[in-house]
Image (spheres, rainbow, N blue to C red):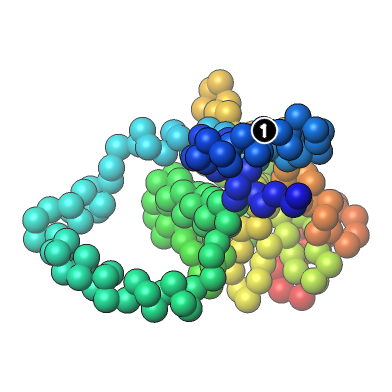
Amino acid sequence: MNWSDDTLMAYADGELDSAQRADVERALDEDTALRQRVAALQVQRDRVQAAFSAVLDEPVPDRLSRLLQPSAMVSLDAVRAARDRDTEERKRERPSMSWAQWGGIAASLLLGLLLGLQFDRGGTGLRDGKLVAGDALAQALTTQLASAPVAGEPVAVHLSFVDRAGDYCRTFSTAALAGLACRQAGQWMLQTVIAVDATPSGTVRQAASAMPQAVLDAVDQRRSGDMFDATLERQSRDQGWRR
């Protein structure tokens, strides 16, 4: 029997009824690959929770607290009424989404919040379903040279290269994040962002070798040639990362 990820995740979360759970457990006893799939889904869920649980401990910024004031509240009765009117229509028009898809959306939103909290000025946000670097991060990606790092900057830029689509891409890190961004339509689009353990001193990572493996894997999957040397990096920077 082919088991969907939704069913396996529901099993891992204890959401199946006794009959369904017994069916899955029998299959797990007989299928090593199925056990590995369940373990992988559990690891994926745990990583999402671990990576972004710290966001819940962040103090709520004043601009968000104001949204909770009575003047900003909306009628829940009105919301429920509107929801009830179009529930059936949404069910007909919207395809079902797996736990992994919802997890991806949630992870993107949490990353946007995390980046927005860290780089409050011109915060990172979503554009057409993609994360776009806000002003502080974009400024670092546009102007910094990995070959001439500046001490005390909140962002460090490491590797630069051209990807298979012909876009400039650069890796970056902060005290708590690491990622890969590519220049598309005049903006730095975040391709991969990973929450990492904060450095002991709270300073940014200054070596490309300190990049998480997930970021290095993303680089290998995208790049079409060699990494930039200091000369090519400076030339690309001076040309505004335009080809």
Residue 66, image x, y percentages: 18, 53
Residue 208 visible to the viewer? no
In this view, the residue farthest toward the left is 70
Determine the residue positioned at 63% across, 43% down: 8
In this view, the residue farthest toward the top is 200
Residue 214 visible to the viewer? yes
Indicate the quadrant where residue 34 lies.
top right
Determine the residue positioned at 71% across, 74% down: 242
Q: Quadrant of the C terminus?
A: bottom right
Determine the residue positioned at 52% across, 41% down: 16
> Mark 1 falls on what kind of element?
helix
Residue 123, image x, y percentages: 43, 57
> Label 1: which residue?
25
Front one among 37 and 3? 3
Few, some or many residues within 10 Å of mark 1 (<14, 14–19, 20+): some
Determine the residue positioned at 28% across, 69% down: 83
Q: Name the residue type under label 1.
A: Glu
Is 190 on the left or on the right of 81, as rendered? right
Residue 230, image x, y percentages: 81, 51
Is 168 on the left or on the right of 48, as rendered? right
Front one among 196 and 47? 47
Is 89 on the left or on the right of 81, as rendered? right
Indicate the quadrant where residue 53 lies.
top left
Indicate the quadrant where residue 156 lies.
top right
Q: Give the total of numbered labels.
A: 1
